[in-house]
Every structure is written in structure tokens, then in C-alpha cells.
Amino acid sequence: MTTSPATPFTPLTGPLSAPPRRIRVDVWSDVACPWCFIGKRRFAAALERFPHREHVEVVWRSYQLSPETAAGPGRPEVDALAEMKGLDRDQVRQMFAHVTAVAATDGLRYDFDRTLAFNTFDAHRLLHLAARAGGAPLVDATTEALFTAHFEQRADLGAEGALVALAGRVGFADHGWDSDRVAAALAGDDAADAVRADLAEARALGVTGVPFFVVDRRYAVSGAQPAEVLTQLLDAGWREANPLAAVAGGDVCGPDGC
């Protein structure tokens, strides 16, 4: 990733200056990925300090770490990962202890002893339904609620009705999507193609791990990077999209002299 120069720039003003060009950040993540929740918090911190944040569009994209997980009620995460990786349960608990400690530094309280593994495909469908119903704000709220329910509240998101109930809590009904409408959509294949398209695009881009952040298909960074690195990513994308700038603070000559 290119590190932007430290020299301060100011946007041009006046009748010939163009309005700032928006940049788009695509974030591939899985709601059952502990590093993705950490990455979401760090990206939010980076975006909060980014001076052009009102010109940034954030799009959450689907990724599945364990697509082979059976649909339906969840099972203990420790058991599921131990079987999938062929590891001893104590080894898995050590891995979880590390990520739990890191998460705590970002204000998250993971509880892997009671976290339940589940197939996330329908959760990703719900996120696409959120985009259709309420746009980016509802997607962000739904993403946050899914992460929180899974990692901090020990919810079984694979249980029947769990996603419908979550949709009700985050305000789908405020956008004309009551519980019956959400339930009907999830009972069928609504938004399944959108999830598959995200997964296919991730494969085309060579994404092998999440979270994965891409700015305008030009700059990318993988992993739950520190907020400072994600700020640099945003800055690199911004300068690529808005190259015309003036160096501030130098000595100049004007109508009144030099």
C-alpha cells in the first residue's frame, strides 16, 4: 500500500474547481469472523478521523469462512473449529484467548466458551436485504448487531427465527419490512444471488482471508489493521480520486506583492 506524503494539501476553491469525487470502500467480511468485528471497529475509528469522511461510501460484501457448516441451529465454536482444523480443543482455546485479548483492546467482549458456530449464508442474505430496505445505515446497524449477537451475546443465529428477530431489533420495520416480510424473504432464495456474486468477486480478486478492504479497486489491505493503517488506505484512495490540489503554507507572490 502506498503511504501518502506528509505535505498538507488544501482543495482548490472557486468557479473552476470541481466538487470532490467520492471514494468507495468495499469490505469483505464474515459475521462469524472475530477479526472482522475488530476490523470493523478499527475502520470506524479510521473513518471518524478521516477529514473527507462525508465523501466515502462503504459497502459491506459477503464472505464465508466455513461454507460447509451445516444450516440450522449452531454448535459450540470450540468443537466446530477443533474438528475443522484437526486441533486439540486446548489449542483452539489458546487461539481464542489471543483474539479475545486483542478484541478487548478495541472495547469488545468476546465469549468463545459459549459462542455457537453457524452457517452464515442467510445472515449475509439479511445484510443484502438491509441494503435494499434501508441502505447503508441499516446495513451498518445490521452488521453491528450480527457481530454483537454472535460474539458477545452468545446468540444462536442459526436457530429458526433468530435472524427475523434481529431484523426487528435493528429497525427493518421502519423501512416497510415487518417480521412477516423478512421471514418470507429468508424462507425463499431472496438475495441469495447477491451473496453468491460477492463470493465470486472475492475469488476473482484473490481474497483468501477477511476482513479485506478495497478502495476504488485500486488500493487494498487485508486483515484487522490498526486504525492508522486504514486511515492511510483512505488517504491513498482519496488522493488518487482527487489529484488536483495546492500545497498550503509556501511562499507566494500575489497582487499586493511578494
Image (cartoon, rainbow, N blue to C red):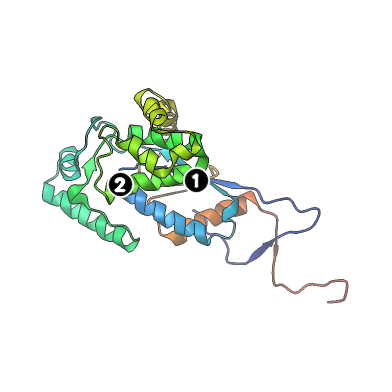
Answer with left or right where residue 210 lies relative to residue 138. Answer: left
Seen at 28% across and 57% down, the residue is 109
Is residue 206 in view from this perspective?
no
Which residue is painted at 40% across and 31% down in the image? 182
Q: Which residue is mark 1?
A: 137
Return the residue nearer the eye: 200 or 4: 200
Residue 149: which disc?
2
Residue 176 in the image, given as x and y percentages of width and height: 49, 34
Q: Amino acid at mark 2?
A: Ala
- Helix, strand or loop for disc 1: helix
Q: Position of residue 199 (x, y in %)?
A: 40, 33
Location of residue 230 in the rendering, given as x and y in whole percent from the top left corner = 47, 56
Q: Residue at x 17, y 45 (%)?
A: 78
Callout 1: few (<14), some (14-19), or many (20+) C-alpha neighbours within 10 Å?
Answer: few
Left or right side of 102 for 47: right
Q: Measured from the top left, where is residue 183 in percent x and y?
A: 36, 29
- Which residue occupies 45% across, 42% down? 139
In the rendered image, the quadrant that contains the C terminus is bottom right
